[in-house]
Image (cartoon, coloured by chain):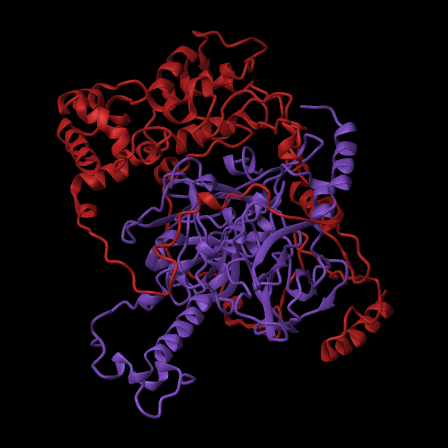
Chain colours: A purple, B red
Amino acid sequence: MKQFTNDTTADRRGFLKNVAASVVAAGALVPAGLSAKDDPALMKEPEWGKKLGKPVDADLYGMPSPYEHNVQRRVHELLSSGDMYASVAMSPVQDIEGIITPNGLFFNRAHGGVAIVDPNEYRLIIHGLVEKPLVLTLEQLKRYPSESRIHFIECPANGSTGWRAPQFDTLQFMKGMMSQAEWTGVKLSTLLKDVGVKPTAKWVLAEGSDDSHMGRTIPIEKILDDAMLVWAQNGEALRPEQGYPVRLLVPGWEGNLNVKWIKRLEFGDKPWHAKEETSKYTMLTPTGKAVQFFWPMEVNSVITRPCPDKPWTDLKKGDVVEIQGLAWSGEGTIKGVDISFDGGKNWTEANLKGLVLPKAWTRFSYIYKWDGKPIVLSSRAYDDAGFVQPTITQEISKMGVEGIYHRNAIVSWEVKANGEVHNVHVRDYKKEKENIQKMQKGAKNA
Amino acid sequence: MLKLNKKISVFAAIAISFSVSAVAGEKDVKVQAPKVRAIDGATEYKVEKGVYAGVYRVNTQTDKIKKFGYGKKATANEIKVSDIDVRYDWQGLPDGKGTPAKGEELYTKNCVMCHGEFGAGGKGYPVLAGGQGSLKNQLIDPASGDEPPVRTIGSYWPYASTLFWYVKTGMPFPHPMSLTNDDVYSIVAYLLSLNDIQVGGEDLDDDTVLDKKKLMTVVMPNVNGFYPKVNGKNGAQNVKKFLSKASNYGTQTVRCMKNCKPGEVVKIKHTLDDGIKPPLSEKRDLPKVKAGGAANNKYAKLFEANCKACHGNKAIAPVPGDKEAWAPRIKQGKETLYKHALKGFQGMPPRGGTNLPDADIKGIIDFMVSKSK
């Protein structure tokens, strides 16, 4: 895994050691009063302190330091449908601080490439079982009273490579199909006052205007509860990757339902059964039957430090270190996170820190004194909907391993004595097989 | 229950302040469920005294406004051209007709390069036929040689309406919304015939005409393969009931704190890490300056928009820059390459399935060759 790591702590230590050695070796060159214990980086005036920096009009849309250029979304051929248009670029979850993903690092899932929509030509059309079918321009839409909410968006296939076995040794590729932003837009319950939804309307089709013409069905209850049409993320216009100029926000629900480049809302009395609620985004179980319309993302968590991408190779025995991570639930607010050092046999409570918001990433933290011995670290979140993250075996014993979507089993890291961190599963294969066979037995093969 | 929770919260406070292990010596701790659940089984949040979910302030003046009056009333024509979906009850299915024979012709021109001969798939794109009888398969042990389930139109999809809708609005992948309704009927007829799906109790022959009336009689083999039931009066409520009960999908309601039995530690045996596109470099250093310029080329842009869906995947077609793949092709001479591109050759459809003029096709070939020398 080391070859993909962004963390340069090890490199930096090596560098300092080398510099110190060269200072000692070239002893005659050490100026008077400078000892080998002094950090040379501090003992000289740095280059940037001896000249003017860039003028303030050099970067009128600012970019991260060029030194951070390795912190970026990444792709994998196996996670695409044979191309980079119906594909996903994974967010570097391991590098995100706090609970907001910078717009340029927000995971990017598209089904027919990233459309570039002309905002002047943008129109939203609302029709079907309504009193007044409506057409809105972007400016008209933005005139409605706005609200801002912090929510994660997660693709339900996040972590799907882990169903059969651990296969990735990097957090970015295990959980990088999720990100969080502060979204600004209008609540649909506000906008729909101008439309007048008929009482016979039970379902809404939301459809995008891109190559894939993504359509998804949403029940009226959710539309009128907390769904929004949003045009801004983290204070600026939506990025094209997030559906510029307008996307649907369905807090806590499958990423796919948050239709990007949204063009049309149709109200109807029946669900539509679109391509992404029949052929895909349904979970096949060992009975041969599949779960459909599984809307929310379940309670989940992962330790982000340490992780395979952010190991403890610079720690030594007896060091005190913060273990931290992210917990989230599309079904409510995180109530707490438990943490285990023995692969889930015994658990203790971690602390939540920062903002604790509904349907949002929540940070947890635990101060730990590492004795330098190997451990297996796991986290387990629970929410105010009364749900607790399952073990791998608990989840598989109900869903099997072929469901693709909605995997929220506990994630475990093996921390070795040298500080390396690896993705491992803690599971009871025998029990899983028995339970799967039991389910298969009671069912007819389709 | 309430008593137990009270006790836990007191003990939990102690556990946090002293960082002692486990919650007050309890083995299993039940997590409190909400009083009211939303349609998805989630906690339902309300605005109370101008505060939503206890955290967000809201401007409650909005509640008092009956109408804002923005936008304009949609016309019948606007609704007609925008309403492109086909619902499972066939609402929205347009008139038209086609045959499997014509469908095969269109498939060969527009679809085969990704979905394979007879819908056999491969190259990362979905398999379109077969898989019947495989849905119960579970590949829990990849070393076992067991077959995984194969989800296709015939084995898995519950409604043929989805097939029509998908082809009409999402295919062909690089230029959707370009097929006529008759074309879509033909492709749908061909794909149904590949899956041995009957229409009106009869097999689809090459020249069987599939029209609106006939298509609406199609019942897919796996129509009853999905739960919870969402069609009918209580659809959303059925989903709510299903999602409210964690044991339906393996999620838990109890935190085991001590002596739990999660199983054994399993390490990575088969890694997927090799396929990761690596970062530009591994250190926190300055980025290397890349030689650029080509991206602004007109033909580079045309290539991106029209050809890359296939020519960006070396399993399907030669990728610009892949010198090894291009060497024998370049050797044939540009005139041959132009001819193959314009008239079609093997998996390559004429003009790559586009309507670009000769000059643009030739320009794109020149661009691809220049990148690959």
In the picture as drawn, the residue positioned furthest to the bottom comes out as: A33
Residue B348, above or below A98:
above
Q: Nearer the viewer, residue B249 or A397?
A: A397
Q: Quadrant of the N terminus of chain B?
A: bottom right
Q: Quadrant of the C terminus of chain B?
A: top left
Q: Position of residue A257 (x, y in %)?
A: 51, 47
Q: Nearer the viewer, residue A389 or A195?
A: A389
Q: Position of residue A139 (x, y in %)?
A: 33, 59
Q: Position of residue A364 (x, y in %)?
A: 61, 69
Q: Nearer the viewer, residue B182 or A54?
A: A54
Residue B363, above or below A204:
above
Residue A344, above or below A282:
below
Q: Where is residue B168, by image quadrant?
A: top left
Q: Is residue B240 left or right of residue B67?
A: right
The residue that appears at 77% across and 70% down in the rendered structure is: B21
Residue A47, above or below B287:
below
Q: Position of residue B22 (x, y in %)?
A: 78, 68
Is residue A133 in view? no
Q: Is residue B26 left or right of residue A108?
A: right
The residue that appears at 74% across and 68% down in the rendered structure is: A348
Q: Nearer the viewer, residue A166 or B86?
A: A166
Q: Is residue B316 left or right of residue A153?
A: left
Q: Where is residue B94, by image quadrant?
A: top left
Is residue A429 in view? yes
